[in-house]
Amino acid sequence: MSKRVIVDPITRIEGHLRAEVIVGDDGVVQDAFVSSTLWRGLEVIAKGRDPRNIPLMMQRICGVCTYSHYLKSTIAVEDALGIKIPYNAELVRTLMNAALFLHDHVIHFYHLHGVDWVDIVSALSADEAKASKLAFKYTNNPIGTGENELKKVKEKVAKFAQNPQGLGPFANAYWGHKTFKFTPEQNLIALSHYLKALEIQRTAAQMMAIFGAKQPHPQSLAVGGVTCVMDLLNPARMGEYLVKYQAIADFVNNAYYADIVMAAEMYKTEPSVMKPMGVKNFMAHKEFMIGREEYLFDSGIIMNGDLSKVFEIDEDKITEEATHSWYKDDAPQHPYEGTTNPNYTGFIDGQSVGPDGKMVDSKMINEKEKYSWIKSPRYNGEPMEVGPLASILVGYAKGNKKVEAVVNEFLAKTGVPAAALFSTLGRTAGRMLQAKLVADNALVAFNNLIENLKVDQETCATYVIDKDKEYKGRGIGDVPRGMLSHWIRIKNGVVENYQAVVPSTWNAGPMDSKGAKGPYEADLIGLKIEDLTQPLEIIRIIHSYDPCIACAVHVMDTKGKTLSQYKIDPLYGGCTI
Amino acid sequence: MHFILYGTLPALDVFNRPKWAYGLRIHDACERRGRFDAGEFVEQFGDEGAKDGYCLYKVGCKGPYTFNNCSKQKFNQGTSWPVQAGHGCMGCSEPDFWDKMGIVHEPLGDRLYHTAFGGLGSDATADKIGVGILTVTAIGIAAHAAISLIKNPKE
C-alpha cells in the first residue's frame, strides 16, 4: 500500500517549504506535492507608493538575495521611465552582482546543500595525513587541507560531538545514511572547506559592501544609476575590492570546484542523484554586463532537453496561474495584470509516516484543491526550470565560448557524460560552474570600469516622473537562483500594480490547471527512498534548486486560517510616545 | 549582549531601544557632518559634490531624524555604510519609516500626501512635519529626561 511521507519544514533553505510524497511498497515515489506555507504580500504593500521607494522595499522580500530584488526592481522603474543608465553604473552593478553570486553560491553549496553530500560523522574517523595527500588529486593548489589544519578541524568538530546537542550545528541530520558516498578522508576535506567557507562568505559580504554600503540589503542604487561614485574614484577602495575578489576566486577554483569534481567522481553511480530530472525545459536571461553590450550569460529557452535548438524569450508569454495556489484568481495572468488576492483553504486530515516509521495522524495537502502560497508560472503554458544550470545549458547550447570551455573541461575531468547534466548532480555542478565563470570574468568588468572612468565619470542619469502619464516596465535577468522579473505599472506618479515572478516560483510552484507539474514536484516522482524515516534523497533534490521561499510566496499560521492583521496608526507618533 | 557582558540591562530610550546603540542621531556622528555645517550639499547623485563627499540631505538623507549607530559602527566589520556609499540614510530604524520618512531620494518636506501622516495636505505638509518633528523631538527629549530620572535617580 502506498504511504505518504511529509517533510515539513525543509530546513537549510530560506523560507518555509513543505514536501509531501506518496511512496509505494517498493520505496519509489509515485506522486509529489510541494507547498509553501508562508504568504508574501509585498506586492500589495507596494501599491499606491512612490516608485522610487519600491526598490528598497522590494529588496526586503528576503534576507539572502536582497541585491537581486533591489537591482531588478530598480531596473523595472528605469525601464518604465525610459532611463538609460550610464555605462559606469552598469559595470558597478555587475561588480556588486559578482559579490552576490560568489557569496550566494558558496554559502549554498557548503552551508545549505553540502551536508546532503558530506557525512560529518564519517569525517571524524578520517586519517588526516591521507586526506591531505588526497586533496591534490582534485586541484594543484588545495585550500585548508594541510595535515595540521585537518587535525584542527577534526578536533573542533569532535568537541561539538561531545556537547549535549550531539554535533552542535551538525546535530539532527541523517548521518550514516546509505546514500552518502564520500570516504572519511573526502568527508574531512569537504568539512574543512565548510568551515573555511564561513570566512569566505564574510569576505564576499564585505566585497558587496565596498560599493553597496552593506550586505545584506545594500543601499547604493538609485533610479538612474549608482550613488557610490566616491568609492569608484578612490584607488584604496578599488584595491580593497580586488583583494577580496581574488581570495574568493581562489576558493571557488581550488575548493568549490575541486569538491564538485570529487562529488561527481563518487556520486556518478548513485541513482538518487543521477535520476533524470522531471521537467527538461530551461529558461535563462542574459546577465552580467562585463563590457559594452557584452554579457557573461545568455538569454534563451531549451525545450525537452534538446540542446540543438535555443528559442528566444518572448516576455508576453510569461504568465502565472493559481489553480492550486491559495489565491482567488485561478486563470493565467501576465505579470503586468497580475493580482495577489489570498484565498487560503488550509490542509486536510490524513495519515503519514511518523519518525518511527509508523503511520500517524497528520495535516495533509489537499492536492485536488489549492495547496500552496506559490503561484504556478508558465512560459507559453509550459513549466520551466530556472537557475544556474539553466543559464549554463542555454550558454552551452548557444555556443557561448566561455561557458562551453568550463563545461567541457568539467565533463572531461570527471568523465561524466553531457546527459548527466540533466540531474541533481548536474544542477549542483551547474551552480559551481556559474560561480567559476563569475570568479574568472568579473575582472573584465573591473578593468573596463577603470578604463572608462579615465574618460567618463557619469554614474547616475537624471529623469522626471510626469504625474499625468502612465508608465509600465520590467526588470528581468538571472540572479543566483535563476530568472527573476519585476513588473511595475505607474499611474498618477504612484505604483498602480506590482508583481515579482521569482526563480523559486518557477521551480517550486504547484500543478497547473492541466495537471502539469513544476520542476520540484516532477523531479521527486520516480525517486527511490531507502528509508522512509530518513528521506535524505528528497532533501538532496530539493536543496539542489537552492530554494529561497520568502520571495517565492506571496504571515501565515498553517493551523489557523486567519492572516496576520496589522493596525496602522492614523497619525504619526500617535500612541507610541 | 549588554546583559551577558555586564550583568545588567542597558538603559533604554522611549521606544525601548538600548541607548548605547540608539542614543545619537545618524546625523550627530556622520562623517559628512562638516559638509552639512558648511552648507555643501549634493544636489543630484553623481554630481561634483557627490564625488567630493558633500552632505546628502538634499538627496533625501533621513539621518537627522534617525537614531542609530550606523555612522559609528558601520556594516560588515566596518567596511562601509549607506552615507559612505553616497546614499542617504532611509531612516529604517524609526517606527513606521516606510510611511513617515517620505520619498527616499528627496528631503523629507517633499512627500506624497497619502502615504504619510495619515494624509495630511501637501501645502501644510512641510510646516506641519517641521512642527511635528520638533514636537516629537521635544516630547522625546522630555520623555527621555523623565525616564532617565525615574531609572537613575542618582544622576
Image (cartoon, coloured by chain):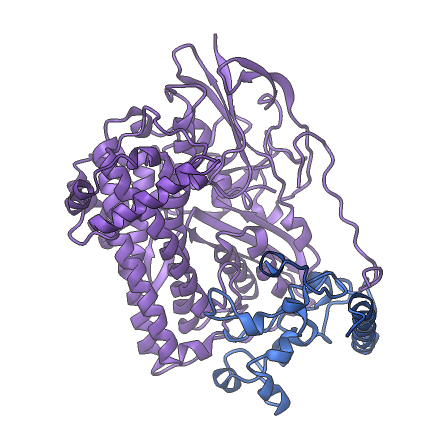
Foreground residue among B2 and A55:
B2
Residue shown at 45%/79% (left/top)? A230
Give the position of the C terminus of chain B as an image quadrant: bottom right
Residue B135 in the figure: left or right of residue A438: right
The quarter holding residue A333 reads top right
Residue A529 in the image: state x and y as whole percent.
39, 20
Foreground residue among A355 and A503:
A355
Chain B drawing hue: blue
Residue shown at 40%/44% (left/top)? A111
Q: Is residue A51 visible?
A: yes
Residue shown at 47%/83% (left/top)? B51
Residue A494 in the figure: left or right of residue A220: right
Residue shown at 34%/43% (left/top)? A389
Residue B151 in the image: state x and y as whole percent.
79, 65
Residue B33 in the image: state x and y as whole percent.
60, 84
Residue A465 in the figure: left or right of residue A257: right
Q: Across the whole image, how many numbered discs are drawn on residues?
A: 0
| Above-or-below relation of A105 to A280 | below
Residue A424 in the image: state x and y as whole percent.
34, 34
Q: Is residue A431 visible?
A: no
| Above-or-below relation of A364 to A337 | above
Residue A277 in the figure: left or right of residue A211: left
Foreground residue among A479 and A115:
A115
Give the position of the N terminus of chain B as an image quadrant: bottom right
Chain coloured purple in this rendering? A
